[in-house]
Image (cartoon, coloured by chain):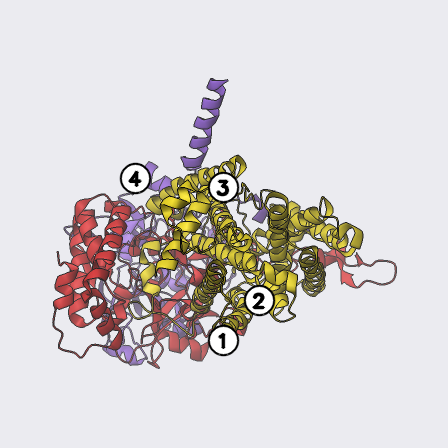
């Protein structure tokens, strides 16, 4: 287990950036190191009683922001995590650190007409992405059941104010047509139900993500392939991103995540589905541990009606590009100028 | 160096002696603070799962205190501004109390920020140089800058002023006055930036309007001076320091007019949102009337409105406003509580209901949240009590630098500390 | 007096430190704890796209399934049990891709193969394609005179090859494999067929990359051709609801604010 002081003395080939340099100077300062060590000891104490875990936590505590790490530091961080997860979950765990592929910009399209509201995407995502299963239960996809709404004949000559002429029609007092309010906790015997449609939502991987802008420590940022990622080890848990997201895509580890070992997916990515710790934000990453290796996302694969489509926006022959060419698409809350790369379409 | 050490020792000696009420008050606050340590231990070891926060309502009681207390801190300017810009003599005599209130309020803000954070152990990530400070992009970093700057400014101003008073010297205006003027502007900035922190998020339509900063300032300059008036009244009642009626009257008028502006802004917001009744007004509808049977905040909202209106009319009536025995403190308490509701839970929570994708939910704080919140306030009042008592000692001349004396002679001297309980804000 | 005080103190402490019960009936964790993961799962169409859960290599299951519904949620090996798609004419740049399908014949209830009975002797070849009441297969087509596909314009033998029941029939009387229903369906549903070839309609799993290996889902893996007029997709049991927010014990407020519910 590398001690912080080892790390500090390590020589690097690449010329260090200002931040890295000053940080090393900071850690080199003995007095401050003692202070920091005391603090981190407390941190380790607070986050787990297990010694191995505490040791790993110790090392993780001194990590810098993932994007600013040198390749060596990334390797070190990844190795530390692999060791910890392997011990913790009792299975050989891989923590990938693959960068974005060149020439790839990920895009997503969802056929809103096809979705039947079965929520299988929600749990495909859960099986893949190592979310906390209970207390808190974390799910990155939310499917909302929407009423198609109707106009009632008996309301035709009703309204307000009545005697002097109708200003507001009688149908205005119910959901005549679709409104944004829907049912989130629907549990019918079978789906799809008549008179309803379903609207799945998840992280839109905005080109102009509000969550990234408000983050005070830049723990969340956009990678070149368009995925908005989070360095879970750098997140301070201020939840500005959660408040700022117009799509309610972000979730928070309110407590220590509960992930049973048998449920844990050992194929992980540092910025993706590796097990999280308490007090940090998380969200959909388009399964980057899979997609950066060429595989479809878990939700695309599971959708029993094929409503979910995924691919490279820079490739004119990709499925998403063909959809953008052939179909009518819209983006959710387009007026906010967040430029989502998650498109909704109908046949 | 020696006078400085003596200042510290003298102050400590002075703080250590007091009446039964003083000790009782401090012990009461200390007990509540201890309870907070218990709650803090729970929260920091188990995580925020011990609160009732959830993904739907991810800000709650702590952030409500945060927003409100930033306003209280900013309100020190209502004492500083008349003193140094309008040369309000009577106010100038006690300006330091206002500054110390600001210091205490900012410290409380820091306590609530710690409770707000999911990973307080990683606070250092936010420090420039060793961490990453996403400035100027992140509004939160602006808030960090202005809050810490404000804390430093007020600490320096208050300490310097008291220290000079202690030494019996005049303040160096070349050093002191620029700081005062900076702190006046800075006070406005802390609350403006806090407003910008939340009203720059279109994801929360209830917050997303440009009246937010001015409403923040108006409510702050209503609630803050109310607290200052209350503490002045307590000081007048329990200590030898007599604060002039003119000073209190000026503050009371500030409260009255800021309340007036607040009520006007509340009305503007309500009409603007509810007349067209778009989906963006759902949060306000939930707050004011309840929505789909969820009515958790309705009673709070209306009681806040009643309190604010009542306080406004009480303060508008000169005979009531000048009645320091009952009506003025009552009006100030109404204002304080009314704003605390309206700008605390009434502002923070409904913005999360419904969620950006339309989910209606409700939030009530957990027991641990309440314990920690009460404890945070108690800790702040504890600090303020000590600071104010020390300041009063200096202002009265009871704590002053005497070169000839040493500690031993002081103990044996005839000098007895005047018994005054600084039971500020016990109401 | 002291007892009361102690009791009060104890209950206060209990309230402080005991987490309130979460309402987790019919949620994911409830099924995880109370219902074992089924060994037989279905992929898209319940009953017609079954898969048996095994391990493709130690520690890696071929599929992970829903404890509640038995639906497949996750593929360890997206190409498990597939075979090359064959001579599908793919009119796109993706011709270089490796496309595989899961054979349909294994999923068909009566496939032994079909010609085991429909050999012209045991069951004689039909004289014409006109609709007539069926004595058999009523579990698949309850009322053969009212086939729920094509609104009377088509009947069994417009699709099933009368001379070789192990195949479908193309426009010219040629044979189409049961494993390539898209070639049959595409006879009428040309636009959907075109979307399907582009990957817009239907479903593929495996690699999103241009040139990557994909498993293509074929028509009958999702649609029931004999009832498609009633349900484009046969209703299935939904997966569990999410848990309510910590402070909520129900979601009654969100139900039925539709017609007549007001606000």
Please determine if labels 4 and 3 lie on a single subunit. no
- Residue C251: x and y in percent read 53, 45
Task: Say left or right for A252 vs A28.
Answer: right
Please determine if labels 4 and 1 lie on a single subunit. no
Task: Say left or right for C71 vs C151.
Answer: left
Task: Name the residue that disc number 4 marks.
Answer: C36
Name the chain under label 1.
B
Task: Name the residue that disc number 3 marks.
Answer: B416
Q: Is residue B273 above or below residue A92?
A: below
- Residue A292: x and y in percent read 26, 69
Name the chain under label 3.
B
Quadrant into which the N terminus of chain A falls: bottom left
Chain with purple colouring: C
What distance separates the C-alpha of mark 2 from that of mark 1?
Answer: 42 Å
Q: Is residue C263 above or below residue A105?
A: above
Instruction: Identify the element where label 1 is drawn.
Output: helix
């Amino acid at each position: 287990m590398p001690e912080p002081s080892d790390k500090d003395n390590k020589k690097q080939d690449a010329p260090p950036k200002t931040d890295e340099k000053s940080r090393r100077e900071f850690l080199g300062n003995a007095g401050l190191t003692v202070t920091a060590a005391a603090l981190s000891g407390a941190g380790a104490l607070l986050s787990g009683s297990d010694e191995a875990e505490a040791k790993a936590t110790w090392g993780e505590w001194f990590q810098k922001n993932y994007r600013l790490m040198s390749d060596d530091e990334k390797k070190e961080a990844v190795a530390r995590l692999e060791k910890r997860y392997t011990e913790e979950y009792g299975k050989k765990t891989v923590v990938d650190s693959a960068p974005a592929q060149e020439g790839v910009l990920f895009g997503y399209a969802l056929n809103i007409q096809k979705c039947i509201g079965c929520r299988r995407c929600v749990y495909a995502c859960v099986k893949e992405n190592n979310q906390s299963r209970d207390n808190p239960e974390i799910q990155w996809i939310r499917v909302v059941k929407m009423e198609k709404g109707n106009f009632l004949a008996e309301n035709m000559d009703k309204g307000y104010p009545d005697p002097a002429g109708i200003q507001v029609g009688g149908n205005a007092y119910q959901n005549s047509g679709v409104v944004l309010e829907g049912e989130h906790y629907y549990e019918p015997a079978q789906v799809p139900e008549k008179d309803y449609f379903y609207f799945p939502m998840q992280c839109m991987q905005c080109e102009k993500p509000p969550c990234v802008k408000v983050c005070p420590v830049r723990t969340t940022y956009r990678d070149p392939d368009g995925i908005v990622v989070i360095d879970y080890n750098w997140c301070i848990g201020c939840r500005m991103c959660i408040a700022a997201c117009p799509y309610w895509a972000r979730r928070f580890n309110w407590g220590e995540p509960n992930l049973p070992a048998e449920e844990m997916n050992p194929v992980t990515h540092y910025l993706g589905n590796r097990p999280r710790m308490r007090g940090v934000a998380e969200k959909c990453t388009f399964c980057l541990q899979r997609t950066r290796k060429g595989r479809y996302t878990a939700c695309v694969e599971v959708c029993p009606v094929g409503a979910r489509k995924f691919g490279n926006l820079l490739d004119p022959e990709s499925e998403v590009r063909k959809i953008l060419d052939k179909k009518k698409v819209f983006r959710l809350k387009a007026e906010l100028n967040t430029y989502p790369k998650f498109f909704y379409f109908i046949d | 160096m020696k006078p400085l050490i003596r200042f510290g020792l003298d102050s400590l000696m002075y703080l250590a002696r007091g009446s039964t009420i003083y000790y009782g008050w401090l012990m009461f606050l200390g007990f509540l603070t201890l309870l907070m340590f218990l709650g803090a231990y729970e929260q920091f070891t188990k995580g925020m799962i011990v609160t009732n926060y959830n993904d739907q309502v991810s800000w709650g009681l702590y952030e409500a205190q945060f927003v409100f207390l930033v306003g209280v801190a900013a309100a020190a300017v209502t004492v500083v501004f008349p003193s140094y810009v309008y040369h309000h003599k009577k106010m100038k005599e006690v300006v330091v109390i206002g500054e110390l209130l600001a210091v205490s309020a900012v410290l409380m803000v820091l306590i609530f920020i710690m409770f707000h954070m999911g990973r307080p152990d990683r606070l250092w990530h936010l420090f420039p140089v060793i961490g990453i400070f996403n400035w100027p992009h992140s509004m939160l970093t602006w808030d960090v800058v202005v809050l810490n700057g404000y804390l430093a400014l007020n600490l320096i101003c208050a300490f310097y002023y008291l220290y000079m008073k202690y030494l019996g010297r005049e303040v160096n205006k070349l050093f002191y006055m620029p700081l005062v003027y900076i702190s006046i502007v800075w006070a406005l900035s802390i609350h403006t930036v806090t407003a910008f922190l939340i009203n720059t998020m279109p994801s929360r339509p209830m917050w997303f309007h440009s009246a937010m900063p001015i409403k923040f300032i108006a409510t702050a300059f209503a609630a803050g001076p109310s607290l200052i008036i209350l503490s002045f009244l307590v000081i007048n009642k329990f200590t030898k320091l007599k604060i002039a009626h003119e000073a209190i009257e000026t503050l009371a008028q500030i409260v009255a007019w800021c309340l007036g502006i607040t009520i006007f802004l509340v009305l503007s917001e309500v009409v603007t949102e509810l007349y067209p009744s778009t989906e963006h007004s759902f949060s306000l509808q939930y707050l004011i009337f309840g929505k789909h049977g969820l009515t958790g905040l309705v009673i709070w909202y209306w009681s806040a409105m009643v309190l604010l209106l009542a306080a406004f009319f009480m303060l508008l009536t000169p005979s009531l406003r000048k009645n320091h025995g009952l009506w003025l403190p009552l009006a100030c308490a109404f204002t304080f509580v009314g704003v605390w509701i309206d700008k605390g839970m009434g502002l923070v929570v409904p913005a999360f209901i419904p969620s950006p994708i339309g989910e209606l939910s409700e939030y009530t704080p957990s027991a641990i949240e309440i314990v920690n919140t009460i404890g945070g306030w108690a800790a702040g009042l504890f600090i303020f009590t000590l600071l104010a008592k020390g300041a009063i000692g200096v202002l009265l001349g009871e704590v002053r630098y005497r070169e000839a004396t040493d500690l031993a002679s002081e103990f044996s001297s005839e000098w007895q500390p005047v018994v005054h309980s600084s039971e500020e804000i016990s109401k | 007096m002291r007892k009361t005080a102690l009791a009060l103190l104890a209950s206060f402490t209990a309230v402080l430190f005991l987490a309130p019960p979460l309402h987790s009936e019919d949620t994911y964790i409830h099924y995880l704890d109370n219902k074992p993961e089924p060994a037989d799962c279905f992929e898209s169409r319940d009953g017609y796209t079954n898969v048996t859960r095994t391990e493709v290599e130690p520690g890696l299951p071929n599929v992970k399934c829903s404890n509640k519904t038995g639906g497949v949620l996750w593929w360890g090996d997206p190409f498990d049990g597939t075979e090359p798609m064959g001579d599908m004419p793919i009119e796109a740049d993706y011709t270089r891709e490796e496309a595989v399908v899961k054979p349909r014949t294994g999923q068909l209830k009566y496939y032994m193969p079909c010609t085991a009975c429909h050999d012209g002797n045991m069951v004689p070849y039909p004289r014409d394609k006109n609709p007539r009441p069926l004595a058999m297969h009523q579990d698949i087509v309850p009322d053969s005179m009212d086939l729920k596909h094509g609104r009377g314009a088509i009947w069994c033998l417009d699709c099933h090859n009368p001379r070789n029941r192990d195949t479908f029939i193309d426009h010219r009387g040629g044979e189409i494999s049961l494993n390539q229903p898209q070639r049959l369906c595409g006879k009428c549903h040309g636009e959907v067929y075109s979307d399907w070839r582009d990957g817009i309609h239907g479903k593929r799993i495996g690699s999103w990359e241009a040139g990557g290996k994909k498993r293509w889902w074929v028509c009958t893996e999702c649609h029931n051709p004999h009832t498609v007029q009633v349900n484009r997709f046969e209703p299935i049991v939904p997966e569990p609801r999410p848990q309510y927010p910590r402070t909520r014990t129900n979601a009654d407020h969100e139900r039925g604010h539709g017609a007549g519910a007001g606000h």
